[in-house]
Image: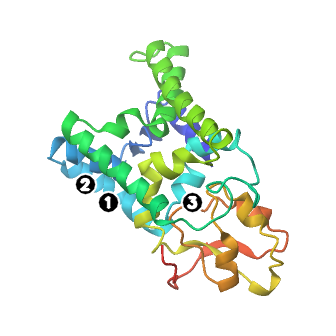
Amino acid sequence: MQIIVLSLFTTQLLVSGAIIAGSLASSRIFNTIPMMDVFAWLEQTAATRSPTFESVIAVLVVFTLYSVLGRFFCGWVCPMDLVFSLFERKLSGPRAAPLTRPHSAGRVETAIPLVMMAIYLVLSVLLGQPFFTTVSPVAGMTKLGSTLVGVIYNIPGAAIGLVMAWATITGFALIVNIIAEYVFGVKRLWCRFICPIGNTYGYVMNRYSPLRIKVTSVEKCKGCNLCSMACPMSIDLLEYIQSGRDVSDYRCFKCGRCIEACPHGVLKLGFSIKRSKDKQ
């Protein structure tokens, strides 16, 4: 699905934005439906102090969508997840570094993304423009693809300098993630602590979203913990399985890697109206 989304943004100049126009920060579908990332809207509002009516409609569309889907964006839409997954370890065992092996998020780990979001908003106010949204590799990858196509087809407004700029931003995020995992033992540093987009969906929507990783049968679980080891965000899924709870951890982006790793069919992705008793 990430490839499809990236392809749609990449080819938007060839079809004059007939299907989708913009980036993952702010876009318009079929030249009609406006969409705007929640944190991008918060930064824009903090910077300008005067949100437009259209931006409010655009952010409400996205907010409503991910209120149902939760942090689905990170595992199925965000192109950076696709890039990061190509270079990271597929399994994180119990002997891995503390922030890489499966674990429950502590207070410090939970607080850092909130602090980072506050910093971005303050910088947006001080600079008078959205800070993270301007340098985000998430939106950057979609802009990189469309600009590159524009250069190849000599479309006005596309420049090789822009291609290099967006490539540098995307490459920087990838390098940071690789160094964090292989040198400092922190898997998915970018997704966990730096990027506010997914964390906004995680903190706000994951607790109430009806789309969840569901435990189908506690009895089927053999305790191998392969599901947790396959999780790119190092969530201790065995804790959820043993208590028979749906996964509502703010870190979960419902990518389904845990489902694929489980040899006993204990987990599945589906909708549930019951509330989880998760403390996070």
- Label 2 CA crowd tier, 10 Å (few <14, some 14–19, many 20+): some
Looking at numbered disc 1 in the image, what kind of residue is underneath it? Leu
Residue corresponding to mark 1: 60
165 sits to left or right of 237 = left
Which residue lies at the image location 59% right of the left edge and 73% below the top edge?
A: 247
Question: Contact, CB < 8 Å: mark 2 with mark 3?
Answer: no
Quarter-of-image position of residue 171: top right
Mark number displayed over residue 253: 3
Which residue lies at the image location 76% right of the left edge and 54% below the top edge?
A: 91
* Residue 163 percent coordinates (x, y): 49, 20
Q: For the residues marked 3 and 1, what is the alpha-carbon distance in whole angstroms?
A: 20 Å
Which residue lies at the image location 32% right of the left edge and 44% below the top edge?
A: 120
* Residue 98 percent coordinates (x, y): 64, 57
Quarter-of-image position of residue 92: bottom right
36 sits to left or right of 189 = left
Mark nearer the N terminus (2 vs 3): 2
* Residue 170 percent coordinates (x, y): 53, 31
Mark number displayed over residue 180: none
Q: Secondary structure at mark 2?
A: helix
Q: Tell me: residue 185, above or below residue 63.
A: above
Mark nearer the N terminus (3 vs 1): 1
Residue 33 visible somewhere in the drawing: no
Q: For the residues marked 2 and 3, what is the alpha-carbon distance in whole angstroms?
A: 25 Å
Question: Contact, CB < 8 Å: mark 1 with mark 2?
Answer: yes
Residue corresponding to mark 2: 56
The foreground one among 77 and 186 is: 186
The foreground one among 269 and 176 is: 176
Q: Secondary structure at mark 1?
A: helix
Q: Tell me: residue 168, above or below residue 265.
A: above
Looking at numbered disc 2 in the image, what kind of residue is underneath it? Val
8 sits to left or right of 199 = right
- Label 3 CA crowd tier, 10 Å (few <14, some 14–19, many 20+): many
